[in-house]
Amino acid sequence: MQILAKIGTPGKYCPSSGRLDYICRQENMMAKRNWFDIAYLREGDPLQQAVYEAIHGSGIMEKLAAYTPVPAGSYPIGVYLPGSDIDIICCFNDRDMFYHELALYIQAFNKHSMTIKTIREMPGVIGRFEYGGFEFEVFGQALNVERQYAFRHMLVEHRLLQERGDGFRREVIALKRKGLSTEEAFASLLGIEGDPYEGLLKAEAGQGP
């Protein structure tokens, strides 16, 4: 499911164009950000504000506070498509306990499901549910969230968007509309060959674009 903000006059968010004219405010807001405080979403464009309301209303940040939950993915950096998931990443020490607590929590929501999946040789727990017109995906690993790929990619992508401007952002979104993942879209525009998920981390280390 998805929420579409109302189409407005120039200067307002327009789903049909896929972007917005909040750019100056967005860039100022994004220059310095505490990624662990979702208040920045409340200051974003209308869909980001709706994401804030959905996260806040679901209570997930409070329920999973012991697991350092933090939003990641396309909404925080403004490269989402209609219907994009709200991604929340977490860190656990005890996988079974995290699985149990997450499963118990999301059973109150529509379309809930739980999966254990190994990603890059590290087991992870994935919980999915629907709330407030959005599909949520909660991902946990026995790895500090700042070291997880999703968080590290988000920081690199955020920096690149700040450096390269809104034209670059529109190109990322255009490639995503063609079916590429966020990381694949960035890698394509940056000329990164091979694994885009590893390639973007070279930019993090100053070895790439």
Image (cartoon, rainbow, N blue to C red):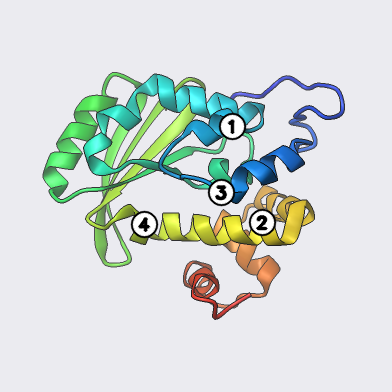
Do the residues bearing badges 4 and 1 touch, measured as CB atoms within 8 Å? no
For the residue marked with disc 3, what is the amino acid? Answer: Lys
User: Distance of mark 4 from mark 1, alpha carbons?
Assistant: 22 Å
**Which residue is rendered at x = 69% and y = 61% of the image?**
163
Tell which circle, 1 or 3, labels the residue nearer the N-terminal end: 3
Task: Say which element carries label 3.
Answer: loop
Mark closest to the chain's N terminus, 4 or 1 = 1
* Three-letter amino acid code of the residue under disc 4: Glu
Count neighbours of disc 4 (C-alpha within 10 A) and say few if under 14, some if 14 to 19, many if 20 or more. Answer: some
At label 1, the amino acid type is: Gln
**From mark 3 to mark 4, how far is it between C-alphas?**
17 Å
Q: Nearer the viewer, residue 75 or 66?
A: 66
Total marks in image: 4
Q: Which mark is residue 146?
A: 4
Marks 3 & 2, CB-CB < 8 Å contact: no
The residue that appears at 66% across and 56% down in the rendered structure is 161
Q: Residue 111 vs residue 196: left or right? A: left
How many residues crowd mark 1 within 10 Å: few (<14), some (14–19), many (20+)? Answer: many
- Whichever of labels 4 and 2 marks the residue nearer the N terminus, that label is 4
Q: Amino acid at mark 2?
A: Leu
Query: Which residue is labeled 2 in the image?
Result: 161
Residue 206 lies, in percent from the top left, at 54, 77
> Can you tell which mark lies on residue 48?
1
**Residue 34 position within the rendered picture, expressed as x and y whole percent measured from the top left:** 46, 44
Whether residue 1 is visible here, answered yes or no, is: no
